[in-house]
Amino acid sequence: MNGRVHWRVESRYRKTWRTKVHAAWLASGLRDQVGGPTVAKRVWLTAYTWNVLDHDGLVSALKPTLDGLVDAKVIHSDAPSSGHSVIYSQQIRRGGRGVEIVVEDQ
């Protein structure tokens, strides 16, 4: 086996994360505290993981989270030319894995 996940399973995983991020943003009540989607923002994404990921793996793992912020219209795009800064970090926390998201205007 090559260790890859079937594309439908991967697609469902990504869609679930995007939906959860969008719902969490709406529930947070922070929509009025940051500027519109085109206002430059600094986004910190901290992954709490079981093992350390290399940088490419970390960015790939957090892509659905960033896409969820685009879906929620927190940022208008995740392209490098969008004017938004995304800072990726990770911490080993085997007891409670997940992602912490911090957004602020630049």
Image (cartoon, grey):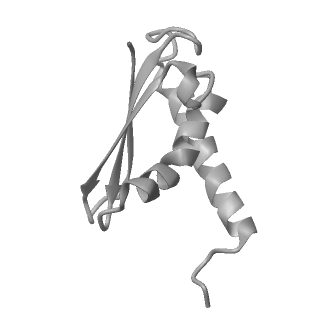
- Vertical arrangement, residue 50 with respect to residue 82, above or below: below
Q: Position of residue 86 (x, y in %)?
A: 42, 32
Task: State the residue at coordinates (38%, 13%).
Answer: 106
Residue 78 appears at what percent x and percent y? 57, 31
Q: Residue furthest bottom?
A: 1
Which residue sits at x=59%, y=37%?
Answer: 68
Which quarter of the rendering shows the N terminus? bottom right
Occupied quadrant, residue 71: top right
Residue 36 position (above or below residue 28)? above
Question: Please, is residue 9 above or below residue 97 in the view?
Answer: below
Which residue shows up at 30% across the image and 67% down it?
Answer: 51
- 51 lies left or right of 29: left
- On the image, the x and y values in percent for residue 103 come to 40, 24
Q: Is residue 53 left or right of residue 79?
A: left
- Determine whether 16 is above or below 67 in the image: below
- Residue 98 in the image: x percent, y percent? 39, 53
Q: Residue at x 45, y 59 (%)?
A: 57
